[in-house]
Amino acid sequence: MKILHDITTLRAWRARQTGIVFVPTMGNLHAGHLSLMQQAKQTQLPVLASIFVNPLQFGAGEDFSRYPRTLDADLTQLEQAGVDAVFVPEAHDVYPEPQTCFIELPDLAQQLCGEFRPGHFRGMATVVMKLLQMAQPTHAIFGKKDYQQLAIIRLMCQQFCLPVTIMAGETMRADDGLALSSRNQYLAPHERDKAPQLYAELNRIKNQLQSGNKHYTLLEQTALNNLAQSGWQTEYISIRDATLTRPKPDSAHLVILAAARIGNTRLIDNVEASLTTGPRIQ
Amino acid sequence: MKILHDITTLRAWRARQTGIVFVPTMGNLHAGHLSLMQQAKQTQLPVLASIFVNPLQFGAGEDFSRYPRTLDADLTQLEQAGVDAVFVPEAHDVYPEPQTCFIELPDLAQQLCGEFRPGHFRGMATVVMKLLQMAQPTHAIFGKKDYQQLAIIRLMCQQFCLPVTIMAGETMRADDGLALSSRNQYLAPHERDKAPQLYAELNRIKNQLQSGNKHYTLLEQTALNNLAQSGWQTEYISIRDATLTRPKPDSAHLVILAAARIGNTRLIDNVEASLTTGPRIQ
């Protein structure tokens, strides 16, 4: 596995490939990331991963400085997963001067997580645009765990006509249903025991939707109440269609999204609900 | 010369080249554009021009609808200039859905022309990013006539790490000094007679700067007064350094920029002033 430390090295490696599939990460890799790498391998293209904790997408008071950094273990896992190259830039490679040009996003970026993390999606979209320009992938994979992020990246790539195919990776879960996340390790044992309830509430809504219940606000409110009674501080629970607008009467593919805190740890999750027998959104 | 009517055709042509040099235009070609094509030919790369009048960079009440469209004559000129391919998309190719993602620019985009054309540079940068993604050029040429546009495009490409070399084309002028522009044809004969005064005033400032005069505000004010006395409505005259910030005491390369109206016609121009014997900014 090639370790590419800067943009020049990355571009030299890229120039020797025809197509590549790119899987950007913030490191601290778990089985969720590794499933994206397996999906990447299945394309038969050379696989490029990246590890970069992007300061631009963390707000003041968020966990940028304590975000877990485990580079050596990450590199071992990527090598074992058969990744061909990994791009590990330093902050001064990505931001050699203060960033003054950004990706301006539509109102979707102010909703859901955007309402509670001002500037997060602007910072995320800006660094993803930069990484895509550096790596020039023909394909890139982003996990559905960050469903709103995936939707925004798809929109950005489509609206700026980037010649890249964006692929979605399924969310990996612990046996009890908790979505895998680097932030799970912030949880104290008693918080970890409680954490699967978020997924359980999302699934409860999914089952109601698939039974024909269309009382979205009532379904959301019930889940909010259930979580509050168990001591969660819920930021939002929202039933949307696949593009994250409010469902229309004939929407066949819905997604239920949530962000909630246990103690100081913020968790997000989502569940797709297909109301027909058709294929799920890929 | 290949005429490429849509993105699919453009990409198929692009895939058959290694490097290309790209010269985007809004059509209504004059000798200024053709000098950019000649500069492009000198790179020895295949030359791609584009013709697209971008609605996104025109404000309400500006001249989008009456901007001169002369496609047949433009194609003849491009063919005679030895251009290899020209991309002539329709609005629905560039904007198949309403644009909701934009390039967010720093404060520079609110200054100079940006102060008088709100949203202009945001719309320009957004379409240039899209065209660069569609065409994937290794080189692109923009004229110095639109000096602020050139500076913003350079900043955008640098900050988003686009793998393209931006080249600057010199301003072409009529014998009396008037910078060539599609908008010159809006001028009535008596306005056309007066128009070279803008360049004359910029040159007067340049000569003063090169004589060691550093009273920037006074130099600007004198030119404003001279133009007002001749019936111009001047939007700005501003002495800047090559990156369009206010000159520092040791700035060796300055540029004097102006926008002014004769009657209903808005003209812009600029003159570079090198204060040393070193090379001019390329």
Image (cartoon, coloured by chain):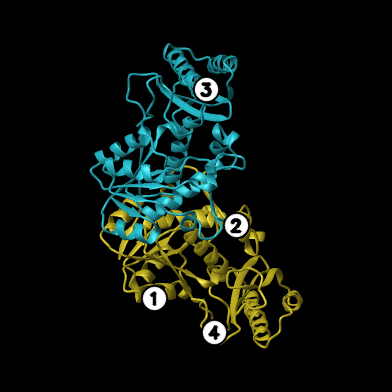
Chain colours: A cyan, B yellow
Q: Which residue is mark 4?
A: B175
Residue drawn at point x = 32 percent, y = 70 percent: B45
Q: Which residue is mark 1?
A: B38
Q: What chain does mark 4 sit on? A: B
Residue situated in front as seen by the camera: A152 or B8:
A152
In the picture, the disc for residue A191 is 3
Three-letter code for the amino acid on which mark 3 is drawn: Glu
| Nearer mark to the viewer, of 3 and 2 | 3
Three-letter code for the amino acid on which mark 2 is drawn: Pro
Q: Quadrant of residue B148?
A: bottom right
In the picture, the disc for residue B106 is 2
Residue situated in front as seen by the camera: A26 or B49:
A26
In three-dimensional space, the C-alpha distance between marks 2 and 1, rounded to whole angstroms, equals 32 Å
Three-letter code for the amino acid on which mark 1 is drawn: Gln
Drawn side of residue B46 relative to residue B222, left or right: left
Three-letter code for the amino acid on which mark 4 is drawn: Asp
Q: What chain does mark 2 sit on? A: B
| Nearer mark to the viewer, of 1 and 3 | 3
Residue drawn at point x = 40 percent, y = 45 percent: A71
| Nearer mark to the viewer, of 4 and 1 | 1
